């Protein structure tokens, strides 16, 4: 005969978890994959419209489990004058079910916004806020008790015989977050550190006696690229969830394949330890417009429950990005380099200067002059014949290119009214989007070095030409090497 003892025990556990849930947004092991419930400032940190779907299922035995499904959408906002992404608006819904047959449900809806503030080249601080509405319900029709057994026959319509007076609870809340991110020259996230406060104004948990107890929930999370060997990056990561009810700490590392050719997939394999609860194993794959993640929690503690059920949990996450760039290489955007089909021309004011690490100083022969004469034809011809050569898929300056750039700077310093256009070219190996990106980066590398040699930034414009203007055949390696170049055109003097 079925009894209510086990199910009521699990119901009490569900109420305990409910209290924990109301002081904390739904818990995910892949916290980098679920910014909506980790840090509002981390939502929408790229130049694409973004849709995220995530699912987590935890099995605790005896028919009891925890299941969370969420879907979110973020839309970027741009400053047309600054030519950069300034933030995003977003919305998400989640459905949390626990207990036997999902008797306890917590449905959440939120809307949010964030603002990104550049603080240095390739560095930004983001501020985020979410307004949240949650509705918690208990479906007593999915519960049974001894009172429903009459004469050895089960009657589901009979009264449970239990004094259960809480059927639903609705609540409004506010989530706040701040996040610091910095990027490499490919636009990938090199590191991040975030602090957030969830359920800031109306958090509630339940004590052992059933009394309500106000709570707030603090989350600190971070990740950075500690080292990179060729295409292999080592990324330590961690998270701390702090509240008065129970704290949770985790730390680990991801090994990521991050190729220099940014349109190639990035693959990350990670493992981190949630102290006294579980070991998390995760695989994440990032394409240009799609990201996939899967993880599994291996229990490290025999206790049932833990922090939102750390035992035997599996997660799936899918992020799809669509739309096109609305700004040219927005500062501090992980995806601003991922779709380079609009990077046709980048005005000097839209891309921060990135200095190339070199130890030598500009040669003494480069001195400032105040001549305002027009550049003679022979110097003009000399300058426009100079070409910088590059290795396949690279935009690093060679020693030969450094010498040529010193000469270009020397000429331009003598005629400060002269303005030039730097064109970056490629060979035909690779698709057009990648070559446009590489061509633009080659022009940027030349521009940055000329600026270090004293040429005013406003006198230099750049343009990535891809492989559209070859000067030699692309059928031989010798010809392709000649086509991988940057050159200079005088546009005003």
Image (tube, helix red, strand yellow):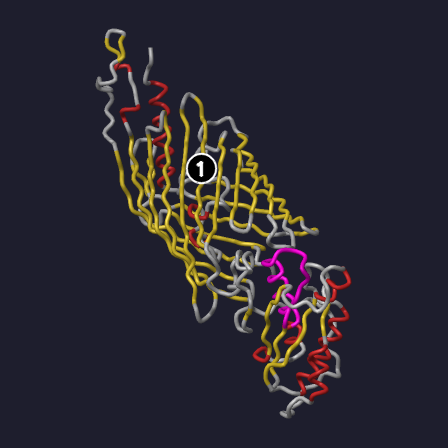
319 or 375, nearer to the observer:
375
Task: Give the x, y percent position of residue 385.
Answer: 72, 77
- Which quarter of the figure is the C terminus placed in? bottom right
Question: Residue 337: x, y in percent?
Answer: 56, 59
Q: Quadrant of the N terminus?
A: top left
Principal secondary structure, stretch drawn in magenta: helix
Q: Quadrant of residue 434?
A: bottom right
| Crowding near the residue tagged with mark 1, few <14, some 14–19, many ≥20 C-alpha atoms within 10 Å | some
> Which residue lies at the image location 72% right of the left edge and 73% below the top edge?
387
Is residue 360 rendered to the left or right of residue 423? right
Could you say which is closer to the camera, residue 80 or residue 424? 424
User: Who's the residue at 70% across and 52% down the image?
Assistant: 230
Left or right side of 34 for 388: right
Q: In this picture, which residue range is highlighted in magenta?
A: 423-446
Q: Is residue 481 above or below residue 109?
A: below
Viewer-nearest residue: 452 or 302: 452
> Which secondary structure lies at badge 1?
strand
Q: Is residue 374 above or below residue 122?
A: below
Residues 142 and 350: in front is: 350
Q: Is residue 443 magenta?
A: yes
Q: Which residue is mark 1?
A: 55
Q: Is residue 209 magenta?
A: no
């Amino acid at each position: 005969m079925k009894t209510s003892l086990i199910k009521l025990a699990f119901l009490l556990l569900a109420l305990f978890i409910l209290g924990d849930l109301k002081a904390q947004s739904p818990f995910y092991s892949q916290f980098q994959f679920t910014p909506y419930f980790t840090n509002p400032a981390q939502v929408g940190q790229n130049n694409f419209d973004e849709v995220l779907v995530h699912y987590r299922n935890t099995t605790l035995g005896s028919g009891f489990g925890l299941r969370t499904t969420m879907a979110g959408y973020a839309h970027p906002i741009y400053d047309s004058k600054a030519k950069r992404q300034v933030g995003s608006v977003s919305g998400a819904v989640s459905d949390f079910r626990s207990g036997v047959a999902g008797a306890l449900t917590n449905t959440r809806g939120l809307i949010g916004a964030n603002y990104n503030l550049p603080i240095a080249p390739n560095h930004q601080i983001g501020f985020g806020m979410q307004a949240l509405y949650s509705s918690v319900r208990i479906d007593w029709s999915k519960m049974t008790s001894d009172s429903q057994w009459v004469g050895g026959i089960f009657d589901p319509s009979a009264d449970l015989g239990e004094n259960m007076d809480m059927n639903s609870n609705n609540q409004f809340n506010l989530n706040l977050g701040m996040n610091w991110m910095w990027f490499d020259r490919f636009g990938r996230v090199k590191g991040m550190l975030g602090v957030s406060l969830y359920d800031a104004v109306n958090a509630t948990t339940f004590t052992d006696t059933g009394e309500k107890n106000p709570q707030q929930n603090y989350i600190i999370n971070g990740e950075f690229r500690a080292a990179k060997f060729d295409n292999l990056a080592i990324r330590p990561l961690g998270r701390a969830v702090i509240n008065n009810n129970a704290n949770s700490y985790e730390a680990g590392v991801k090994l990521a394949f991050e190729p220099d050719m940014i349109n190639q997939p990035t693959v990350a394999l990670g493992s981190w330890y949630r102290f006294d609860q579980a070991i998390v194993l995760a695989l994440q794959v990032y394409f240009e417009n799609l990201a996939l993640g899967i993880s599994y929690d291996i229990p490290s503690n025999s206790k049932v429950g833990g922090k939102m059920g750390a035992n035997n949990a599996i997660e799936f996450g899918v992020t799809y990005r669509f739309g096109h760039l609305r700004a040219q290489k927005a500062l501090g955007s992980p995806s601003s380099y991922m779709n380079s089909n609009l990077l046709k021309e980048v005005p000097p004011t839209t891309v921060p200067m990135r200095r190339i690490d070199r130890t030598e100083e500009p040669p003494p022969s480069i001195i400032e002059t105040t001549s305002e004469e027009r550049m003679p034809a022979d110097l003009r011809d000399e300058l426009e014949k100079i070409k910088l050569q590059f290795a396949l898929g690279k935009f690093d300056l060679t020693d030969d290119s450094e010498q040529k750039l010193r000469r270009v700077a020397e000429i331009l310093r003598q005629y400060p009214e002269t303005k030039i256009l730097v064109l970056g070219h490629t060979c035909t190996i690779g698709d057009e989007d990648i070559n446009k990106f590489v061509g633009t980066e080659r022009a940027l590398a030349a521009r940055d070095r000329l600026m270090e040699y004293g040429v005013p930034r406003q006198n230099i414009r750049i343009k990535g030409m891809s492989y559209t203007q070859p000067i030699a055949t692309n059928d031989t390696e010798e010809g392709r090497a000649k086509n991988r170049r940057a050159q200079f055109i005088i546009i005003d003097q």
